[in-house]
Image (tube, rainbow, N blue to C red):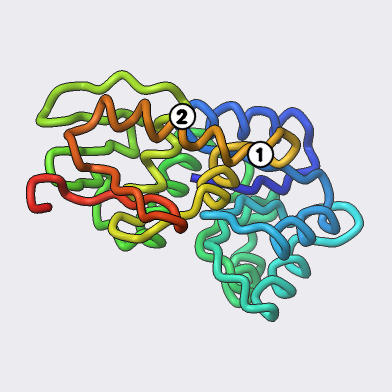
Amino acid sequence: MRILVVEDDAALRGQLVQAMVAAGHTVETAADGRQGHYLGEVEDFDAVVLDLGLPLLDGLSVLRRWRAAQRPMPVLILTARSAWQEKVAGIDAGADDYLAKPFQMEELMARLRALLRRRAEHGSALWQCGPIALDTRQARVLVDGQLLSLTSHEFKLLALLMQRKGEVLSRTELAEHIYAQDSERDSNTIEVFVGRLRRKLPAGSIETVRGLGYRLVDATTA
């Protein structure tokens, strides 16, 4: 999944990125409220981790502007403030969850997984498409119960296809979710990753919709 982290503390920001990348996510970052607001306004993210105490533009103002602009991504607020009034203010501004500092990284990742499940309308950490099972908690994929060996890009690609199974996703859309903002987003390489995935998944699992993109289907019912 594609996550935006808006946090001005460089050390914490680095820890968050490390944990999320290890979990198979693509992560964009911003160190102040203005940059964070801009990225959340012009880019599509599956979830946002947003600090309240940001320079240039505070987190609540960022969140209110996103919601006023009908930006729908789930937002997990981070803050050193723990008063219940501030939690209420965050929720009223449009936050989906709230975590006070200091926190355990395991708890933050669990809360993030919950937000992603709700967004994808999945009720558990295990996503299923026929014989293919993707465990979001352990960042692993099984086919008929057998563990599949995937590269990080292959995992990210499959995770997005699983999240939106049955939908046609363009190469550009897939590339945006796989590559970080400051890297070369070459949609042509998606064909390579799709080809590799096809060789590892049951035949017919990834369909090509000519001129539009790819979609994941249950090959056992196709």
The CA distance from mark 2 to mark 1 is: 14 Å
Residue appearing at x 54%, y 38% in the figure: 178
Residue appearing at x 49%, y 54% in the figure: 170
Residue type, numbered disc 2 = Val
Residue 73 sits in quarter: bottom right
Instruction: Say few, some or many: other residues with alpha carbon within 10 Å of mark 2 (under 14 / 14 to 19 / 20 or more).
Output: few
Q: Residue furthest bottom?
A: 68
Q: Residue furthest right?
A: 56
Q: Which mark is residue 185?
A: 1
Residue appearing at x 18%, y 35% in the figure: 203
Q: Is residue 2 left or right of residue 65?
A: left
Q: Which mark is residue 192?
A: 2
Residue type, numbered disc 1 = Arg
Frontmost residue, 139 versus 49: 139
Residue 196 at x, y = what percent? Answer: 36, 26
Q: Is residue 61 left or right of residue 12?
A: right
Residue 81 at x, y = what percent? Answer: 69, 55
Q: Which mark is residue 114?
A: none
Dot 1: what SS? loop
Residue 150 at x, y = what percent? Answer: 36, 22
